[in-house]
Amino acid sequence: MEIQIDYINYERGGRPNANYSGDGGLPDPTGLVRIMLSGSWPAILGVGEAERWEFNGYQGAYEAAVALRRAGGPPYVPFVGSLPREGGPFGPAILVDPTAVEVHRWYDHRLGDFGSRNRNLLVCSIPGRSEVFRVLITHGDIHDGNQRLADAMTFDRFADPEIPCVILGDWNSTLSGPMWEVGDWNNPDPMMHQPHRRAHKIMFLHGPRQAGPHVADTRALDYLCGFWTPGRRLWLRRRPARRVGGIGFYDVAELEGDYTPTQYPHPFGRPPRTIDRALVNRPLRDAYVRGSYRVHDPLDPSCPDSDHKRISFVLDM
């Protein structure tokens, strides 16, 4: 059975006047509906920045599910997650089509037996099948590459090939490698890379090296998937470019060879990056349906409904 899995970092959860301080009214699912009309309906939909979706009896989450169903989607059941380190009500969410996926567990951060090792973890199966698979949703720390790495290191046991697992998220970083690193981190134009907006994207090197040259901080995803090493000639043989290390996850976009950015170009010329990503462990790497990965453009490119693009892919379970 094939199932489609999508991820969209829905800006501020659809709160139209939200700002960095958290003000901004009730969530509005209208933009999410328009985003999802750009392609087919997934069995599992990961939503980043489900801001305040759990307030007032899960109002934002259930209103989103209702709006998607009225637009022709399946009867999604929402599960709202959390951010580490008391990150506030800005965590991600997962919406599940119960006609396509059976949910066995969701480790809600509000329950008395919650443990951080199970944060945002869904355990599910295909109807009529006994084998379970796991879906994790995450959001990379927006301030600190050290925290992103620390959070990625908590996913080590999910690389276990005994249980299939997929991790969805806005990682706020990329993998290493020339196809992912947008470069230009040393552009002297302050409008291109304002220091306070560049700081969390680059490796922090204390002392004189703070002046540069700067390189992208790719440690979190490299820990999971491996570090990119370029090809080189070794005596009479040529060693191909490849990833080395990693704990057993594979990036779906890289499996497909699709390097389309999931951000929009910055008005000052800063290149967009591919920070919205889906990772799979070995059994789901083998289940990935080649050619199914897609980065969706908005229905109206002049007026996108989020600052990120939707990604989707298919697994043959």
Image: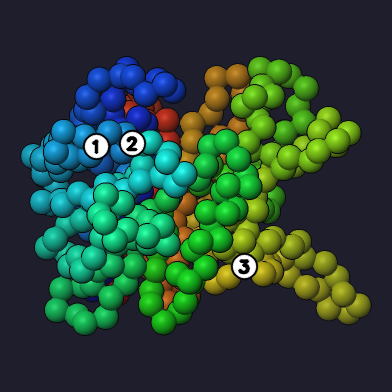
Please name the residue that numbered disc 3 is placed on.
246
The quadrant of the picture occupied by the N terminus is bottom left
Instruction: Give the quadrant of residue 31.
Output: top left
66 with respect to 211 (left or right) = left
Residue 143 place in picture, x, y as percent: 57, 36
**Mark 1 packing: few (<14 Cα in 10 Å), some, or many (20+)?**
many
Counting residues from the start of the chain, the first of labels 3 and 2 encountered is 2
The residue lying toward the viewer, choosing from 143 and 97, is 143
Camera-nearest label, 1 or 3: 1
Camera-nearest label, 1 or 2: 2
The residue lying toward the viewer, choosing from 74 and 108, is 108
Tell me the amino acid under the disc marked 2. Pro
Instruction: Give the quadrant of residue 273.
Output: top right
How far is mark 3 from mark 2, CA to CA?
31 Å
**Mark 2 packing: few (<14 Cα in 10 Å), some, or many (20+)?**
some
The residue under the point 25% across, 60% down is 106
Which residue appears farthest toward the left when viewing the image?
70
Q: Is residue 8 visible?
A: no
Residue 130 place in picture, x, y as percent: 21, 82
